[in-house]
Amino acid sequence: EEFKINELMTNVADRYAVLAGEKGIEFSFSALPEDVMINSNMDLVEQVLIILLDNAIKYTSSQGNILLDVSSDDNIVKIFVSDTGIGISPSDLPHIFERFYKVDKAHATQGTGLGLAIAFEIIQRLGEEIYVESQLEKGSTFTFTLSRNSGVRS
Ligand code: ATP
């Protein structure tokens, strides 16, 4: 299945700009200057984006920022979801893709701790990679890769 990455991301960004705005978070999205075709499963890629953006909104307070970004080179498109939220400590960071793992379990947050485990499984199934960089009280950046169809352009 082929789809245009800018088209998918613009669609998702439009929805999350509204959700972020409702919480007083600034939301930015920058599309690729030239759209790129991706040969993958669009619904699964969208689900990963939704998991990451839901978390970005959940773990960022008002006045914060969320950035949805994308880069591409000859073979690989990278998608970045950055937030200026609460961040993740170095001791929690290696575990956040595990099932049911939640930081600060004493806190009665609504989450199940499954979102990132599902995102991880989807990305593995697609043969791609997902990783995270984070600093406590500074924010987090989740990045995942998508292999593009080299030579195919819109
Ligand atoms: P749910 O999947 O039901 O939304 P959840 O958010 O608790 O629940 P995950 O999405 O798997 O579960 O995330 C696991 C943990 O990683 C979260 O509980 C949270 O502590 C931490 N986390 C995830 N994303 C972020 C983020 N953007 N900023 C800070 N912490 C995060």
Image (tube, rainbow, N blue to C red):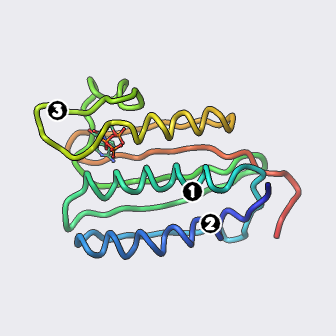
Quarter of the image for residue 145 reads: top right
Q: Judge: label 1 CB < 8 Å from ligand 1.
A: no
Give the mark nearer the N terminus: 3 vs 2.
2
Which residue occupies 29% across, 48% down?
Answer: 139
Q: Of callouts 1 and 3, which one flags the residue occurring earlier in the amino acid sequence?
A: 1
Pointers 1 and 2 in contact (C-beta within 8 Å): yes
Q: Is mark 3 within 8 Å of ligand 1?
A: yes
**Label 1 – label 2 distance at C-alpha:** 7 Å
Q: Where residue 136 appears, x then y in whole percent? A: 22, 39
Would you say 46 lies left or right of 40 here?
Answer: left
Q: Secondary structure at mark 1?
A: helix
Closer to the camera in the image, 73 or 61 = 61
Crowdedness near tag 3: few (<14), some (14–19) or many (≥20) residues, C-alpha within 10 Å = few
**Relative vertical location of residue 110 with respect to residue 104 in this rendering, above or below:** below
Compared across the picture, whether 151 is left or right of 131 comes to: right
Q: Amino acid at mark 3?
A: Asp
What percent of the width, then of the height, locates residue 127? 69, 34
Residue 66 in the image: state x and y as whole percent.
36, 62
Q: Quadrant of the N terminus?
A: bottom right
Side of 33 relative to 29 (left or right): right
Q: Which residue is mark 2?
A: 8
Identify the image quadrant of the C terminus.
bottom right
Residue bearing mark 1: 46
Few, some or many residues within 10 Å of mark 1 (<14, 14–19, 20+): some
Mark 1: amino acid = Glu
Where does label 3 land, which residue? Answer: 104
In x, y percent, where is residue 82? Answer: 40, 53
Q: Secondary structure at mark 2?
A: helix
Q: Cα distance, mark 1 to mark 3?
A: 28 Å
